[in-house]
Image (tube, rainbow, N blue to C red):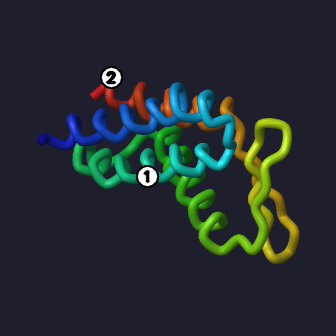
Amino acid sequence: MNPKEQVLHYVSRAEQLLRVVYPLSKEPKVLVDVCKELSKAFPFMVRITISLPEEQQKVIDDVEAILEKHAKSPVEFSRDKKFIICSDGYDLTQLTTEKITRYLNTIKQFVKNE
Protein backbone atom coordinates (compact mmCIF):
# COMPACT_ATOMS: atom_id res chain seq x y z
CA MET A 1 0.00 0.00 0.00
CA ASN A 2 1.19 3.48 -0.74
CA PRO A 3 1.17 6.16 2.00
CA LYS A 4 -2.08 7.72 0.82
CA GLU A 5 -3.85 4.36 0.96
CA GLN A 6 -2.45 3.78 4.45
CA VAL A 7 -3.80 7.13 5.66
CA LEU A 8 -7.20 6.32 4.13
CA HIS A 9 -7.14 2.90 5.80
CA TYR A 10 -6.59 4.33 9.28
CA VAL A 11 -9.05 7.17 8.70
CA SER A 12 -11.64 4.60 7.63
CA ARG A 13 -11.05 2.58 10.80
CA ALA A 14 -11.32 5.71 12.93
CA GLU A 15 -14.52 6.71 11.16
CA GLN A 16 -15.99 3.22 11.71
CA LEU A 17 -15.29 3.53 15.44
CA LEU A 18 -16.82 7.00 15.59
CA ARG A 19 -19.88 6.40 13.41
CA VAL A 20 -20.77 2.78 14.28
CA VAL A 21 -19.09 1.50 17.44
CA TYR A 22 -19.48 4.63 19.56
CA PRO A 23 -23.25 5.06 18.96
CA LEU A 24 -23.85 1.35 19.60
CA SER A 25 -21.74 1.14 22.74
CA LYS A 26 -22.56 4.62 24.07
CA GLU A 27 -19.16 4.46 25.74
CA PRO A 28 -17.21 7.73 25.43
CA LYS A 29 -13.93 5.88 25.98
CA VAL A 30 -14.22 4.79 22.33
CA LEU A 31 -13.22 8.38 21.46
CA VAL A 32 -9.71 7.59 22.72
CA ASP A 33 -9.61 4.60 20.37
CA VAL A 34 -10.56 6.90 17.49
CA CYS A 35 -7.58 9.11 18.39
CA LYS A 36 -5.32 6.04 18.46
CA GLU A 37 -6.41 5.05 14.96
CA LEU A 38 -5.88 8.58 13.67
CA SER A 39 -2.40 8.67 15.20
CA LYS A 40 -1.46 5.57 13.20
CA ALA A 41 -2.03 7.61 10.02
CA PHE A 42 0.35 10.43 10.98
CA PRO A 43 3.63 8.80 9.88
CA PHE A 44 2.13 8.13 6.47
CA MET A 45 0.92 11.72 6.17
CA VAL A 46 4.50 12.90 6.60
CA ARG A 47 5.57 10.56 3.78
CA ILE A 48 3.01 12.12 1.43
CA THR A 49 4.29 15.67 1.83
CA ILE A 50 7.40 17.26 3.25
CA SER A 51 5.65 20.06 5.14
CA LEU A 52 2.16 19.60 6.48
CA PRO A 53 -0.28 22.52 6.38
CA GLU A 54 -0.73 24.30 9.71
CA GLU A 55 -4.25 22.94 10.26
CA GLN A 56 -3.17 19.31 9.86
CA GLN A 57 -0.10 19.86 12.04
CA LYS A 58 -2.33 21.27 14.79
CA VAL A 59 -4.54 18.16 14.62
CA ILE A 60 -1.47 15.93 14.89
CA ASP A 61 -0.20 17.88 17.89
CA ASP A 62 -3.62 17.83 19.58
CA VAL A 63 -4.17 14.10 19.09
CA GLU A 64 -0.65 13.25 20.28
CA ALA A 65 -1.18 15.45 23.36
CA ILE A 66 -4.48 13.69 24.09
CA LEU A 67 -2.88 10.27 23.83
CA GLU A 68 0.03 11.33 26.03
CA LYS A 69 -2.35 12.72 28.67
CA HIS A 70 -4.39 9.51 28.46
CA ALA A 71 -1.29 7.38 29.03
CA LYS A 72 -0.23 9.42 32.09
CA SER A 73 -3.69 10.07 33.50
CA PRO A 74 -4.44 8.79 37.00
CA VAL A 75 -8.18 9.42 36.57
CA GLU A 76 -10.52 9.18 33.59
CA PHE A 77 -14.28 9.24 33.55
CA SER A 78 -17.32 9.71 31.33
CA ARG A 79 -19.85 12.47 31.79
CA ASP A 80 -22.61 13.72 29.50
CA LYS A 81 -21.35 11.87 26.41
CA LYS A 82 -17.84 13.25 27.00
CA PHE A 83 -14.69 11.41 28.00
CA ILE A 84 -12.72 13.39 30.58
CA ILE A 85 -9.00 12.87 31.13
CA CYS A 86 -7.71 14.28 34.40
CA SER A 87 -4.02 14.97 35.03
CA ASP A 88 -2.16 14.86 38.36
CA GLY A 89 -2.73 18.61 38.69
CA TYR A 90 -6.45 18.18 37.93
CA ASP A 91 -6.20 19.73 34.48
CA LEU A 92 -9.12 18.37 32.49
CA THR A 93 -9.11 17.38 28.83
CA GLN A 94 -12.52 16.70 27.33
CA LEU A 95 -13.10 14.50 24.32
CA THR A 96 -16.36 15.03 22.52
CA THR A 97 -17.74 13.61 19.30
CA GLU A 98 -17.67 17.08 17.78
CA LYS A 99 -13.99 17.57 18.54
CA ILE A 100 -13.02 14.13 17.23
CA THR A 101 -15.20 14.59 14.13
CA ARG A 102 -13.39 17.86 13.42
CA TYR A 103 -10.02 16.07 13.68
CA LEU A 104 -11.23 13.29 11.40
CA ASN A 105 -12.57 15.72 8.79
CA THR A 106 -9.31 17.69 8.80
CA ILE A 107 -7.32 14.54 8.08
CA LYS A 108 -9.77 13.49 5.36
CA GLN A 109 -9.48 16.94 3.76
CA PHE A 110 -5.70 16.58 3.75
CA VAL A 111 -5.93 13.28 1.86
CA LYS A 112 -8.35 14.77 -0.70
CA ASN A 113 -6.01 17.65 -1.41
CA GLU A 114 -2.91 15.50 -1.90
Seen at 52% across and 49% down, the residue is 33
Crowding at mark 2 (Cα within 10 Å: few <14, some 14-19, many 20+) = few
Report the front residue among 103 and 83: 83
**Amino acid type of the residue tagged 1 in the rendering:** Ser
Residue 53 is left or right of residue 79, and the answer is: left
Q: Residue furthest left?
A: 1
Q: Which mark is residue 55?
A: none
**Quadrant of res 89:** bottom right
- Secondary structure state at the residue bearing disc 1: helix
x%, y% of residue 112?
Answer: 32, 23
**Quarter of the N terminus within the rendering:** top left
In the picture of the structure, the residue carrying the numbered disc 1 is 39
x%, y% of residue 66?
Answer: 62, 57
Q: Nearer the viewer, mark 2 or mark 1?
A: 1
x%, y% of residue 104?
Answer: 50, 33
Seen at 75% across and 74% down, the residue is 74
Q: CA distance from mark 2 to mark 1?
A: 18 Å
Seen at 74% across and 48% down, the residue is 83
**Amino acid type of the residue tagged 2 in the rendering:** Lys
**Quadrant of res 24:** top right
Lower sequence index among marks 2 and 1: 1
Q: Which mark is residue 112?
A: 2
Crowding at mark 1 (Cα within 10 Å: few <14, some 14-19, many 20+) = many
